[in-house]
Amino acid sequence: MKYNINLIIVDPKDKDTKELNYEVGFYHEPNDYGNGYRVWLNNKDTGYEEGFDLRYSTEFDENHPELWITDYVYHNWTGENGSYDIQKITIERI
């Protein structure tokens, strides 16, 4: 399962906006431990890549991976000590 993500974040202090584009791939190995899922995120603008092991995640729902993406985006860019607000997020399955 692969997704394109377009994200617009806003600095709440000066209202400066940034647009970020990611490609996200969920990979499943049914013979692996746990649920067998891993995810890989690639920032298409900077080339920065990041991977996560979801095999033992109790929050990951293989029928709705876009919910994991939304949760990741909000926790990564906002959160308790976050420095940005999310203006818009678009998730498109490819």
Image (cartoon, rainbow, N blue to C red):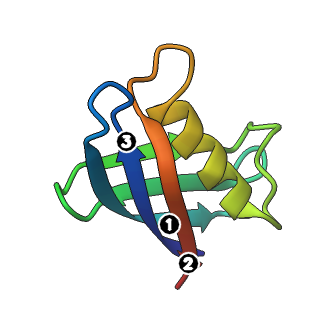
Q: Earlier in the sequence, mark 1 or mark 2?
A: 1
Disc sitting over residue 25 in the figure: 1
Disc sitting over residue 10 in the figure: 3
Q: Can you identify the residue that label 2 sits on?
A: 92
Q: Nearer the viewer, mark 1 or mark 2?
A: 2
Q: Examine the rendered structure and indicate whether residue 48 appears above or below residue 24.
A: above
Furthest-front residue in this view: 14
Instruction: Residue 22: give x, y in percent of width and height.
Output: 37, 62
- Kind of residue sitting beneath label 2: Glu
Screen quadrant of the N terminus: bottom right
Q: Nearer the viewer, mark 1 or mark 3?
A: 3
Circles 2, 3 touching at the beta carbon (< 8 Å): no
Dividing the picture into quadrants, the one containing residue 21 is bottom left
Residue at 25% in and 65% down: 44
Furthest-bottom residue in this view: 94
Dividing the picture into quadrants, the one containing residue 15 is top left
In 3D space, how far apart are the residues under numbered discs 2 and 3 (Cα atoms)?
A: 21 Å
Q: Earlier in the sequence, mark 1 or mark 3?
A: 3
Residue at 65% in and 43% down: 71
